[in-house]
Image: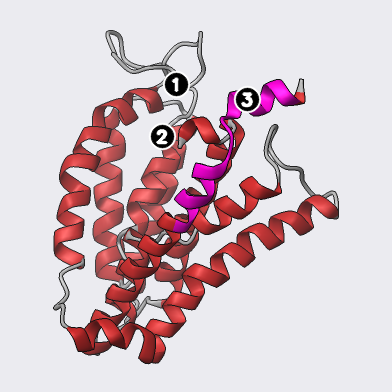
Amino acid sequence: FKNKMPSGVAAFLLTLATVDDLGAIAVIAVCFAKSLTMSYIAGACAATAALFVACKKNVTNMAVYAGLGTALWYCLLQGGINADVAGVIAAFAVPAHAAAPAGSKATPEHEGGEPTLLDHLVHKFAPLSALVIMPLFALANTGVPLDASMVSSIITEPVGQGIMLGLLLGKPIGIAGLSWLAVKSKVGKLPHGMNNTHLITVGLLGGIGFTMCLFLVEMALANNPAAANVAKLAVLASSTSAALIGAGIMARLPDADDQKLKTA
């Protein structure tokens, strides 16, 4: 459906998805921290400080970030804070404007520019992420028993109802509603070419949840396997519904190029 939406809409959705995941990681770090060990927390703070010193010094040797990131991961794990935060912090520390290594085959983010170190890392690790890490995550976290009673419990059990309403109603209302209010109050403005129909569609697509939703289910319902299974099915069912509804709306939209011609 790429030709159905202006490029600004794709950028808006990508940014939304990224910030949404960062918010979920922050919730995991704060709300699920337990049995804190202050010596390891101090070590994590020192590793974080060292990462950002390396960034300020424009260090481009990835072994430095890998080493410090691993140390941060270990300290968080032992300190009682979910260690996933380490990956986010280490990624933030990589210098954004450093040049890619000589001979890099990465495509620059901006046409006509030179590839950066971040472009190089995306090019290098995207296949690993898409073909290895994500499938392993899916296999490890989405296995649930399927039977008639389990499927019907998505509608009848409170945990299923809450997830369905949150993803199919809460997400669209929150995303589209708050964005609309921000535009009306002149706090912000929509990307070029984006209209309210696109905004509603993005709100629906925002209801597609997978990695963070399932990870939160694993942590929040660790001591209640039956409820966790219902919650996982609700996430998958809601995500599928949100994708199909969003696709149905986009299928009815004219091509973005046709919209530009009409505007002109």
Vertical arrangement, residue 132 with respect to residue 244, above or below: above
Question: In the image, which residues are magenta?
Answer: 245-262
Marker disc for residue 258: 3
> x and y percent of residue 128 in the render?
19, 37
Quarter of the image that includes the C terminus:
top right
* Sequence-wise first label, 3 or 2: 2
**What residue would you read off at disc 2?**
94
Q: Which residue is mark 1?
A: 98
Judge by depth and name the residue closer to the eye, 86 or 152.
Answer: 152
Amino acid at the residue labelled 2: Val
Residue 49 appears left or right of 65: right
**Element type at mark 2:** loop
Q: Report, in whole angstroms, how far the alpha carbon at label 1 lies from the one at label 2.
A: 9 Å
Quadrant in the picture for the N terminus: top left
Q: Residues within 10 Å of mark 1 (few under 14, many from 20)?
A: some
Q: Is residue 225 visible?
A: no
254 drawn magenta: yes
Q: Quadrant of residue 54?
A: top left
Q: Main secondary structure of the magenta part?
A: helix
Q: CA distance from mark 3 to mark 2?
A: 40 Å
Labelled pair 1, 2 in contact (Cβ < 8 Å): yes
Q: Is label 1 in a helix, a strand or a loop?
A: loop
Residue positioned 20% across, 58% down in the render: 138
Q: Is residue 145 magenta?
A: no
Give the mark nearest the N terminus, 1 or 3.
Answer: 1
